[in-house]
Amino acid sequence: MTEDLALVRRAAAVLLCYPDRDAPGTLRLLAAELRPVRHPAAEPLRAFLARAGTRSAPELAADYVETFDFTQRHSLHLSWWTDGDTRRRGEALVRFKEVYRAHGLEFTDEELPDFLPAVLEFAAATGSDALLREHRPALELLRLALTEHGTPYADVLVAVCATLPGPSPKDRAAARALARSGPPREQVGLDADLPYGHLGLLPVLPS
């Protein structure tokens, strides 16, 4: 099951990266690799692959851009959900690098270290889900935002969240409660009543 879990996370990391011209072939390979996987989190990935497998490379690229590039509500950078565009985010990014370094890995700086595919690759390679657990509220909020948007990419986030212990929040109110139950964090220029960064200010979380 540990190997299955790593494969699910590695596959999710690939699917959440911008699809290149070889994407259709990559999707077929992932579908084959996931076929024997018994971990429950593999099922939503198989659902995504069944739908994406009918798309051409240009269509896959257009789908990705439409989903992730036009709104921060679908941000794949985990520290955006916790710290937004504040100076505290720089500290959060340093923490990601420190966690990688503690496991003998150096981040290449080709992307920001909080980029979800990078965090998933890290978890798959090391077996450590510490960063994923720490940012569980962000993952759940992203899952809900993608679900509301009606994109198949929601299935990938369903799979990611299913690799973590415990059930996922069923709605935004429950996700906000999960965020508030996390460890207190020092706030910089934010409302002190928002223990999980700026989540209460997000347009995806109206009151």
Image: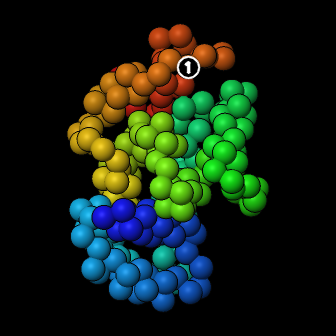
> Vertical placement of 85 versus 102: above or below?
above
Query: How far from the left and from the top, in percent, is residue 53?
Result: 37, 83
Q: Residue furthest right?
A: 109
Query: Between residues 84 and 45, which one lies in front from this camera angle?
Result: 45
Q: Residue at x 53, y 10 (%)?
A: 192
> Vertical placement of 65 versus 34: above or below?
above
Is the C terminus in the top left, top right, bottom left or bottom right quadrant? top left
> Vertical placement of 161 versus 181: above or below?
below
Q: Secondary structure at mark 1?
A: loop
Q: Quadrant of residue 175?
A: top left
Q: Quadrant of residue 87?
A: top right
Query: Between residues 184 and 36, which one lies in front from this camera angle?
Result: 36
Q: Residue at x 48, y 89 (%)?
A: 25
Given the image, on which type of amino acid does mark 1 rest? Arg
Is residue 70 visible in the rendered image? The answer is: no
Q: Residue furthest top?
A: 192
Q: Residue at x 24, y 70 (%)?
A: 38
* Residue where numbered disc 1 is placed: 185
